[in-house]
């Protein structure tokens, strides 16, 4: 529904959901396009949000040990949920079953609800008039909030919000999202400096 409200047709929305099976990247892409951003910039933002799945894939490739012919197809289902379910199993057989069942069920339901939402958005007309243009950001925040458990993670999120909102009036649509991605390395650098100082003080006291 959010995608259709951003100007994409029903078939474009469904194709995006079929090919880009990761919610954060989809919301980022649609949000940037809806804001009038350049398609390449929007795609770049979506790509960076999906990079984490590559790290999931490295771990799952060892755990699942799937045949080479199957791996390109299994890669489409490497997301947060399938990784969590697979890693929670006690043996390789259980991990494979968990990965397959979770991936298949989520992929089917995700694309089915995408189709229904897009058709619904087309039927009601102007989604902005219903306030549905805020649905994408709201869902993204709901997914993100439970993950912010440490002080570093909260600091990175807060800095990303400041960068994104602060640069929104002066940069083209989609670019603030890319700049906001710098919040993570900056927060990690600050945390590293803090830990380094703490270790230095501890060693000084020990002497």
Image (cartoon, rainbow, N blue to C red):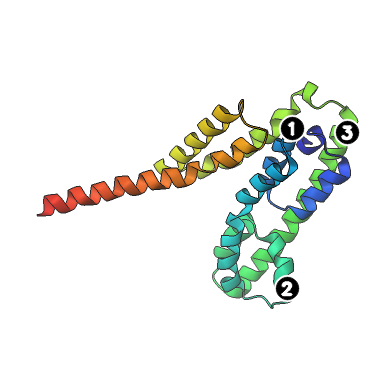
- Foreground tag (2 vs 1): 1
In the picture of the structure, the residue carrying the numbered disc 3 is 122
Q: Earlier in the sequence, mark 3 or mark 2?
A: 2
Residue 91 at x, y percent in the picture? 56, 73
> Quadrant where the C terminus lies?
bottom left
Residue 74 at x, y percent in the picture? 71, 66
Other-residue count near label 3 (Cα within 10 Å), few / some / many at <14 / 14–19 / ≥20 = some
Residue 197 at x, y percent in the picture? 25, 47
Callout 2 touching callout 1 (CB < 8 Å)? no
The quadrant where residue 64 appears: bottom right
The quadrant where residue 122 appears: top right
Question: Mark 3 to mark 2: distance in Å?
Answer: 37 Å
Task: Name the residue at the left extreme.
Answer: 207
Q: Secondary structure at mark 2?
A: loop
Q: Secondary structure at mark 3?
A: helix
Of residue 165 and residue 38, the one placed in the foreground of this image is: 38
Number of numbered discs: 3
> Quadrant where the N terminus lies?
top right
Question: Mark 3 to mark 1: distance in Å?
Answer: 20 Å
Residue 150 seen from this side: no
The quadrant where residue 8 appears: top right
Task: Identify the mark at residue 70; answer none if there is no mark.
Answer: 2
Q: Earlier in the sequence, mark 3 or mark 1?
A: 1
């Amino acid at each position: 529904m959010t995608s259709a409200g951003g100007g994409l047709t029903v078939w474009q929305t469904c194709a995006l959901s079929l090919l880009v099976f990761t919610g954060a990247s989809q919301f980022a892409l649609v949000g940037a396009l809806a804001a009038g951003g350049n398609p390449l910039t929007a795609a770049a933002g979506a790509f960076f949000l999906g990079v984490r799945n590559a790290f999931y894939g490295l771990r799952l490739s060892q755990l699942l040990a799937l045949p080479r012919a199957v791996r390109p197809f299994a890669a489409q289902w490497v997301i947060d949920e399938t990784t969590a379910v697979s890693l929670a199993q006690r043996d390789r057989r259980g991990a494979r079953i968990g990965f397959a069942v979770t991936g298949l069920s989520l992929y089917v339901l995700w694309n089915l609800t995408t189709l229904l939402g897009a058709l619904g958005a087309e039927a009601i007309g102007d989604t902005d008039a219903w306030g549905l243009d805020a649905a994408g950001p709201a869902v993204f925040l709901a997914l993100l909030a439970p993950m912010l458990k440490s002080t570093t993670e909260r600091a990175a999120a807060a800095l990303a919000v400041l960068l994104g909102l602060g640069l929104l009036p002066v940069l083209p649509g989609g670019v603030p999202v890319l700049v906001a991605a710098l919040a993570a390395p900056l927060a990690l650098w600050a945390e590293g400096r803090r830990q380094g100082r703490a270790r230095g003080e501890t060693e000084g006291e020990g002497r």
